[in-house]
Image (tube, rainbow, N blue to C red):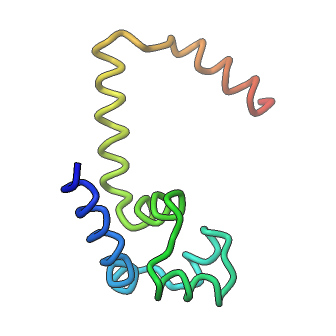
Amino acid sequence: MIEIIENYENYINSLPELIGKSYYKAEFFMQKLGLKHATYYRKLKSKNFTHQEVKLITTLLFPEEILMQELEKSEEDIKAGRTIDLSDFKEKLRAKYNI
């Protein structure tokens, strides 16, 4: 359990560097997190993001990993038989988007 906490702490400490090396500008993270300029930089400097903010930042920094997780989950759903027919799927889309 202590190892998990230490790994999380190390990850939090590396966030400023990871964000700095990313292709995104600071404005992008501010917009996605809904933070003002001063708040964003204060949290970045003090490494004081909430758990939800860390999760969102991680999603933005590592979209390939998120996609791979979703694909693995989809494969598990298919193997377990948790699928729907194409016609049912189309009906749900029509109902949701009024198409």
Q: Is residue 78 found left or right of 3 in the rendered image?
A: right
Residue 37 quadrant = bottom right
Q: Residue furthest left?
A: 3
- Residue positioned most to the right: 98
The residue under the point 46% across, 58% down is 55
Q: Picture quarter containing residue 5? A: bottom left
Image point (65%, 90%), residue name:
38
- Residue at figure coordinates x 32%, y 42% from the top left: 69
Q: Vertically, is 70 above or below 41? A: above
Q: How many marks?
A: 0
Instruction: Indicate the position of residue 22 as horizontal and vertical percent values.
Output: 37, 79
Relative height, residue 59 to residue 26 (above, below) = above
Given residues 37 and 27, the one toward you in this image is: 37
Give the residue drawn at x 36%, y 28%.
74
Tell me residue 15's x, y (percent): 36, 76
**Between residues 64 and 87, which one lies in front from this camera angle?**
64
* Quarter location, residue 29: bottom right
**In screen coordinates, is 23 left or right of 37?**
left
Query: What is the x, y in percent for residue 80?
Result: 32, 12
Image location (x, y in percent) of residue 81: 36, 9
Where, quadrant-wise, is the C terminus in this rendering? top right
Q: Is residue 23 above or below residue 94?
A: below
